[in-house]
Image (spheres, rainbow, N blue to C red):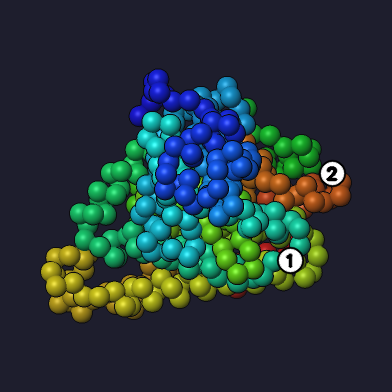
Amino acid sequence: MTTQNTAYRTLDAEGVRSYVASLPTIAARLGSAPETWTIREVSDGNLNMVFLAEGSNGGVCLKQALPHVRVDPSWKMPLDRTFFEAAYLRNVFPHVPDLTTECLHFDPEQFILIVKSLSGHTVLRTALMNGPVIPEIAARIGRFVAHSTFATSLLAAPFEPVMDRRICFARNQTLTRITVDLVLTDPYHNHPRNHWAEPGLTPVVDAIRADENVLARIDSLRLRFLSCPQALLHGDLHTGSIMTTEDDTRVIDGEFAIYGPIGFDAGLFVANLVLSLFATPDTAATHLHKQMITLFWGSFTEHFLHLWNTQPTPSDPAALYYAPTQGGISEREKTLFLESIFQDMVGYCGAEIIRRIIGYAHVADFSVLPNTESREARKKQALLFAKKCLDQKHLFKNVSDFLTSLSAD
Ligand code: SR1
Ligand code: MG
């Protein structure tokens, strides 16, 4: 797909009103007359336009791809990312209906995706910046990662449908290129997209770039990201891709979906909790963030193993990756698989922390700190922790080892 689409028009608020009014089933969700609807532009991410359209009965969220990066119109980009987000939702929503949104409409000419409005929810990053959240949110995300990845992996289905899905998402190359470059490459050398305002970070950046163990690990994580298609990933599971209330948590923005190592989704989520921890320097917040990381990993492993252990035996013995006649996969193999996800999680966590501090797309978390000195000090601690995550000489054995090291600095 290219941007040579003459029918494509970028919508403004009034365009959204007419567009939604032209879709009877979507318009019916809003109720009342289109002229009475409230249309608000709420674009927040780096890439797309997002609107909320609300009527007397309810609301929808409309997302449209632009032919460029939203925050940088000179960075041209094809429109097809909404296709992959719609495809991601269609693949995972049946497995996590209470943890994401259903694709209500996708328009392949206008590259418009419509889902239910979450206007009563708050972006998790914002909620964390505003004060404590309930830690169970992290357990819900653990369940999301377990169900969305297990269901799309070879553990849950014969290889044919899995490979068909892999073929589809292998076309998501524009956004995969962004991840490979921005998350796994640019920060490790001089690149004009990198930036940081605090001069005291430069020696830490230099140390990261000079460390052969770190560079070797990043090389292997980059290779693994592209060559280890364990499951369909969300691909950008940071705290800005999660909307929540106390009772209800939803994962949004699956446009970076790609087959890859399960630890990538887990690592991005944990990294963003770690970033929030370093940006929130008080004992209660540190405890909360650590509790959230523990709950996330516990919930992920519990749900993933439960799905694995209760997988029905297919009538066709060729339908799964192992033959039931051989007694199925051993507990030892399952443990090793989860341990490898844990090690991937730690590595991608390190990469995500680094790129969110010195790469192209930073996080807002540190803006709650009162001055440049405090921001510099906390970002430095986060970078040093990330460096440990990438140090091949030191492997964290388990989540408590990971958390202990988080306190050490
Ligand atoms: C040009 S896109 C930069 C970042 O925004 C998205 O949310 C992804 O995190 C991407 O890496
Ligand atoms: Mg996003």
Is residue 362 depicted above or below 74 in this figure?
A: below
Q: Name the residue under label 2.
A: 372
**Residue 341 at x, y = what percent?**
44, 63
Foreground mark, 2 or 1, reads: 1
**Residue 207 at x, y = what percent?**
66, 44
Q: Which residue is drawn at 76% across and 58% down?
A: 130
Left or right? Give the position of 227 relative to 297: left
User: Counting other residues with Cα less than 10 Å from the Cα at mark 1, is it few (<14), some (14-19), or many (20 or more)?
Assistant: few
Q: Which amino acid does label 1 sit on?
A: Pro
**Residue 162 at x, y = what percent?**
27, 54
User: Counting other residues with Cα less than 10 Å from the Cα at mark 2, is it few (<14), some (14-19), or many (20 or more)?
Assistant: some
Q: What residue type is labelled 2?
A: Thr
Can residue 181 be seen in this snapshot?
Answer: no
Is residue 13 depicted above or below 60 in this figure?
A: above
**Residue 52 at x, y = what percent?**
59, 44
Between residue 30 and residue 77, name the one nearer to us.
Answer: 30
Q: Quadrant of residue 287?
A: bottom right
